[in-house]
Amino acid sequence: MEGAGYRVVFEKGGVYLHTSAKKHQDPDSLIAGVIRVVEKDNDVLLHWAPIEEAGDSSQIFFSKKDTSGGDSCTSEEEPTFDPGYEPDWAVISTVQPRPRHSEPTRGAEPSSPRGSWAFSVSLGELRSIRRSKPGLSWAYLVLVTQAGGSLPALHFHRGGTRALLRVLSRYLLLASSPQDSRLYLVFPHDSSALSSSFHHLQLFDQDSSNVVSRFLQDPYSTTFSSFSRVTNFFRGALQPHLEGASPDLPPAPDDEPEPGFEVISCVELGPRPAVERAPPVTEEEWTGHVGPEGRLQRVPELKARIFSGGLSPSLRREAWKFLLGYLSWEGSTEEHKAHVRKKTDEYFRMKLQWKSVSPEQERRNSLLHGYRSLIERDVSRTDRTNKFYEGPENPGLGLLNDILLTYCMYHFDLGYVQGMSDLLSPILYVIQNEVDAFWCFCGFMERVHGNFEESQETMKRQLGQLLLLLRVLDPPLCDFLDSQDSGSLCFCFRWLLIWFKREFPFPDVLRLWEVLWTGLPGPNLHLLVACAILDMERDTLMLSGFGSNEILKHINELTMKLSVEDVLTRAEALYRQLTACRELPHNVQEVLGLAPPAEPQSPSPPASPLPLSPTRAPPAPLPSADTATATQPDSSLEILPEEDDDEEGVDS
């Protein structure tokens, strides 16, 4: 069914509201209605109305359960029965009709008490869905909004919960809670899911030790307000085959090992070599690499020096333009000037695209309006303790805002995702020029844009690579983390997402990034940095008897307490220890950039994956900066299929 500006994509009758919790319900307490999923004006709505209503539903005011005891649906004379949902989900005390402001729809009685129960809610306002207990006469669903209130329980007297959930899965990610098989957490199928996951990775507060009990009380806000949110998101959303998955949902495919991530065992590493960091590259040393016409000479040697010691602060403004690909290492001074003129024109053409949008146009461009709102909010809280960004009306904040909005014009498909402001801030601080900072930021995003894509395949692959390296370097630590339900290493999510931006003091981040940008000693040094941090903390983790919550809390509390020089020294030592192993498995060599990716595997792998045969390789020197980045294929996990093939009938 379609109409002006809307399209009904799902409709199911025989969906009742039970407005009384009494054991013997009278007919007036059962309100028969129709549930619909409607696409309307770039939004998707879930709409329920009594069968006598034919058009749009009235709106519903959602509020948390009234704890004052003033509105009860039970009586002392007549015992109540368990309707299958907890008191917090009871219908009367959580939903109030909102007065209508529009004309009554055709076929509805304006004064009908049944019509007052009609509601319509955007799918983006949902935060969780709870299913009924098995064995009831009919199945029901309770939908909870982000505001904390619950919609009336929808009782499907003629079945259909499975069909509705599958339709909702076209627009939402429904992740089964590991702690409660009847509860589905709701995440949008767009970049805001990743944005939300990043935004809520906040520091633990003093009461954060009891994460599990808080999760049971309020799964959504707890999961999204602490570091364990990431673990639960990956465990629930990306691994829907966990025990306790709902029988109403189709089973996930059997577990198959991802290509390139076979279990590694019995790899004997030699002793870890000693590594010493060098002093930073000075202006005089940089000048010594400048040849005729301003062309840089002996570039591999210069990159190796930056890797081993970083840059003097006074050099960064110039050197970062080369490290981030804005200026060519081989170009002359005149070629660089011409390139900058060209890129300056290109930048302001893109900036003019959003600058020239009138308020009236923006009201009809929800995507641009959303980006602008999100950027303004993020910029207002990015590095505000840094003198370059502190204080009201700071010009640095205006530049951050303009560069990020222009990036949305530059990369339409990706747009803006929370976390990007963290990556731009140090670049603008060092470059202190709007145009140059923009193109340097684009160079950085070329390396890490996959971190912000909605599929999160890049993040999953990196976590798998990190686990692979750690399994070779320290099997006992991996076994310990596995025993504490922390073996997924998802507490490292933020580290990899924004390259440790929030883990080190601001000056240390500058040093860390310029070392990582050299591409030495391989394409994934940031993974070895993560391994180095875990290696530094292994004794604390393993000897303190930490459980999963304590592990998450301890890792998060390392923020601003790490020494970047110590971490980089250890990361390089780990690299040399790995590359000195003559029987390093091929998939580990791929991660380190020592071998090309393996050929794609057959689509029909053996039932029992065989251990990977080690590939003999001589001890490898530091690879050149031109070493290609190894990429790993990764299988995509589907939470719910879009096909709706269930048959009508009472749900089990």
Image (cartoon, rainbow, N blue to C red):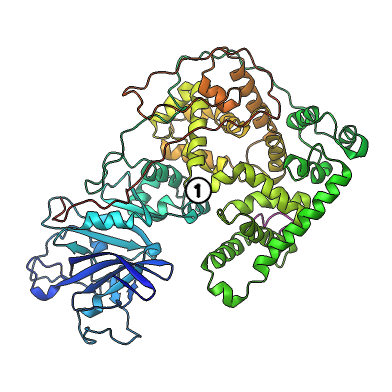
Amino acid tagged 1: Phe
Residue beneath disc 1: 204
Can you see residue 210? no
Which residue is at a point 73% across and 42% down the rendered structure image? 325
For residue 461, side relative to residue 485 (left or right)? right
Residue 588 x, y percent position in the rendering:
53, 23
Magenta-colored stretch includes residue 384: yes
Q: Nearer the viewer, residue 642 or 479?
A: 642
Q: Which residues are magenta?
A: 382-389
| Quadrant of res 602 | top left
Which residue is at a point 66% across and 54% down the rendered structure image? 383
For residue 401, side relative to residue 345 (left or right)? left
Residue 98 x, y percent position in the rendering:
32, 79
Q: Nearer the viewer, residue 85 or 345?
A: 345
Q: Nearer the viewer, residue 430 or 120?
A: 120
| Quadrant of res 305 | top right
Can you see residue 337? yes
Residue 20 x, y percent position in the rendering:
15, 70
| Quadrant of res 503 | top right
Magenta-colored stretch includes residue 190: no
Name the main secondary structure of what is drawn in magenta: loop
Q: What count of labels does the image hold?
A: 1
For residue 8, side relative to residue 133 (left or right)? right
- Most distant residue in the right direction: 292
